Image: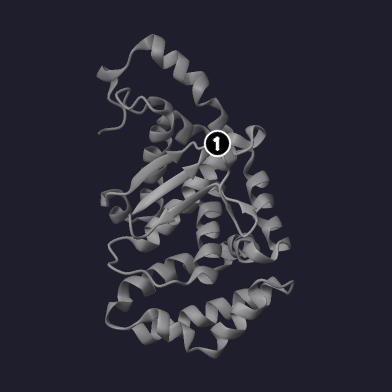
Amino acid sequence: MSLFNDDLFDTDEYSVLDNLFLPYKYILGEEISRKIKEFTIKMKDEDERLFDVLRRELSNWLVCDKLLENDIKFEIDDAQSPVYESGICRYGQYSPLEKKITLFIKNIPDDEFAEIKASTILHELMHAYFDCCLSRKPDLEFIEEPLAEAGMLDFLYQCNGRSFDNVLQRVAEKEKTSCIAHYGFGAYIHQQSKDEVGTLYELYYKILHKGCCIDVNKFIEGLNEYGEYKKIICKPSQDEKKYELLRSILKKVEKECK
């Protein structure tokens, strides 16, 4: 489908959409909200529109055509009972096996609905980005989750939406809960992005896609630094130390993958 096909619009329906997608302006900014609103009218479902436009925009921003070309499935789980993991309410997930993003829509609070829905889709799309065209995916949750959060935050920051600080604070506060503290580290990684030549999540992607001849998972597990990193990532400690350890680990693995 193509963006901006004027022949497919109905003016009355278009005015309804103007109000329908207004909340996303505050987190995604004017330009992306306009694209969601103007996306081909044949795609009636609001969530499908949001997912498709965000995938296109993130693909362009990351300069990764594979994210757009891959057949990533998207579904809404609207079951009445919440889905919990480690006592924490989950908003979404990405399945590498099925190449599918699931949004647990009933878990999202009404007062932060647009912010959380958009940021969750972007977070899961970061996992899909890491997974592009890989036949197998190493299980590196403590590395990948904060990098997915950082990528989502970096993208939203450049959208210049006025509620960005709310999303940043929500991520940062995860450090206070041990089972998801590694997610919270993503806020610090985002704050360091302006000082890095190339981001850590781009380096991680590069490693995964150059490491086809070695077992990246086993190699990282064998690093002393990774063992130390896993010990401190879920405990209150200096983010600067965590960051330098993670950067050191990724640089060493990158060298091994060359």
Q: Secondary structure at mark 1?
A: loop
Residue 163 against residue 221 in the figure, above or below: above
Image quadrant occupied by the N terminus: top left
Which residue is pictured at 32% across the width and 27% down the height? 43
Q: Is residue 236 visible?
A: yes
Image location (x, y in percent) of residue 32: 46, 36
- Of 180 and 56, nearer the camera is 180
Decide which of 70, 156 is in the foreground and name it. 70
Say what amino acid the circle numbered 1 marks.
Gln
Q: Residue at x 39, y 63 (%)?
A: 130
- For label 1, the residue is 80
Q: x%, y% of residue 74?
A: 37, 43
The residue drawn where x is 50% and y is 59% is 148
Q: Quadrant of the C terminus?
A: bottom left
| 198 relative position to 180: left or right | left
Does residue 136 lie above or below 6 as drawn?
below
Name the spot of residue 44 as percent of width and height, x first. 36, 24
Instruction: Pinpoint residue 83: horizontal percent, then vertical percent.
Output: 56, 48
Looking at the picture, does residue 76 appear above or below residue 236?
above
Identify the residue at image location x=28%, y=77%.
212
Query: Is 98 drawn above or below residue 240 in the view shown?
Result: above
Q: Specify the farthest residue to the front.
A: 81
